[in-house]
Image (spheres, rainbow, N blue to C red):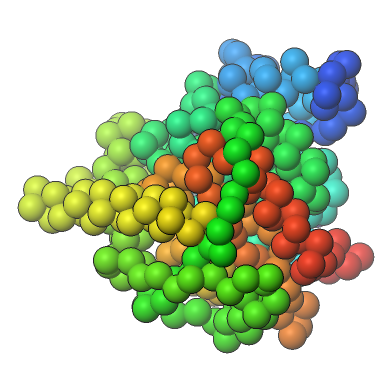
Amino acid sequence: MIDRYNAFLFRDETATGAEGPLAGITVGVKANIAVAGMPFHAGIGSWKDRIADDDAAVVKALRDAGAVITGILNMEEGALGAKTDNPHFGPTHNPHRHGYSPGGSSGGSGAAVAAGLCDVALGTDTMGSVRIPAAHCGVYGFKPATARVSQDGLEPADLTLDAIGPLARDIDSLERVARVISDFGEKGIEGPGATLAGHGVDIHREVLRVFAKVIHDMEAEPEVESLDHPNSRIRFAGFIGVSKAMAAHLEGVAASELLAKLLTYGPRRSSADWEEDRAIMQATREKVRGIVEQHGFLILPTVPNPPFPHAEREPAAQADFTCLANIAGLPALSLPAGWTGDGLPIGVQIVGPEGAEAGLFALARTLDEHLGAYRPPKQGA
C-alpha cells in the first residue's frame, strides 16, 4: 500500500512538470484514464498489468500546461459503483474517518485530494462518480458538460454519460484545471435558481438539516420544481443504460462476481422496458435542461446520505441526485456544505447551463464563501 488510505495504486516519485499556467500543480489520475507508461487497468484485476501507451487528451493538456502527473488512483472495478472497495486492489479509506467509504467510483481521487497527497485529481463521472466522492471527502468536484470534455484515452463506462472532471481542495484550483481540460464557456448565470420537491428520495436527516440551512441562507429563495418521474426510477434507467454499454464493452473480460452480476441487468432488460427507460431519460434530459434554462441553475444535495462504513452495504440512492446532470449532459459542481454532528462531510451541488461554466464557478464561489464549510481531515482520522 503506497499510502494509508490506499488512494494511490502507482506513484511516480520522479515526475516533474514544466512552465505553464499549471506549473507546480500535482495531479493524480484515476486508473481508467490513460497516462503514458503508467498502469491503465480501470480497476479490473485481469488488466492489472496493462500499461498505457499514450496520454489521454486531458492528461496531455495538463502536461502542456505544466502540471506534474504524479500517479494512478484507486477506483471501483470498471467504474461501476459508489463505494470504492475494489475486489482486486482493496478499499480506499475516507481521510475523514478510516474504515469509511470515500464514495466512488472515483474514490481514490477524492481521498488523495482530501488527504493532501496531490493538489488535484482527475476522476470520471457517469452518474455522479466525481461529485459523490467530492461530497464524501469534503472537497470540490466538477463534472463538465458531456460534450465539452474529450473522452479520448478514457476506458468508458457509457460514453453518452461519461465526463472526465477534476477534484480539488479549493475552487480556484478546480477552475484552473477545468479551464485546461474542458471547453469552458464564459457566460454568467442569472436567476433565483431552482430546487426539487416531491423527488421521493430517502434523504438522511443530517443531509436534510444541512441542505435546509443552505437554502435558508441563500440571497434569493430558489423556485421549487418537480420532475416527471421519481429520482430512483430515473437513476435506475440510467444504470440500465450503463450496464448495457459496459456489458458490450467488457464482453469476455474476467470480472468479479459483483461486477459480473451488475453487467447482467442491462442485457436482460426486455426491449419494451428498455424503450421505457430511454423515454424516461429523454424526458428527464428535457425537463432538467428546461428548469436550468428557466431559473438559471438547479441546486440539490450532492448525495442523500453522509459517508458510511465499508462494512455496511452501499446505499442504492447515492446517485439519485447526481445522475440528473449526466442525463441532461450539463455541467455540475459539488462543494462542501456542512458536517454531520459527528464530523463527517456533506456536500451540495449546483447544475448550470452548458456554456456558462464561468457563471457556475462564480455562483459556487459566492456560495462557498458564505458557507465556509471546507475543513481538512483531522490528523489520525
Q: Is residue 109 visible?
A: no
Q: Quadrant of residue 371?
A: bottom right
Q: Residue at x 63, y 56 (%)?
A: 334
Q: Is residue 52 above or below residue 26?
A: above
Q: Position of residue 156 (x, y in %)?
A: 43, 33
Quarter of the picture containing the C terminus is bottom right
Q: Is residue 170 above or below residue 57?
A: below
Q: Is residue 331 above or below residue 373?
A: above
Looking at the picture, tell me which residue is in the foreground, 11 or 212.
Answer: 212
Residue 97 placement, left or right of 325: right
Q: How many marks?
A: 0
Q: Position of residue 339 (x, y in %)?
A: 73, 76
Q: Is residue 128 visible?
A: yes
Q: Residue at x 75, y 58 (%)?
A: 366
Looking at the picture, tell me which residue is in the foreground, 330 or 84.
Answer: 330
Looking at the picture, tell me which residue is in the foreground, 133 or 219.
Answer: 219
Residue 314 placement, left or right of 283: right
Q: Residue at x 48, y 59 (%)?
A: 295
Q: Residue at x 33, y 50 (%)?
A: 285
Q: Is residue 255 above or below residue 29?
A: below
Q: Position of residue 223 (x, y in %)?
A: 48, 71
Residue 154 placement, left or right of 249: right
Q: Position of residue 243 (x, y in %)?
A: 31, 47
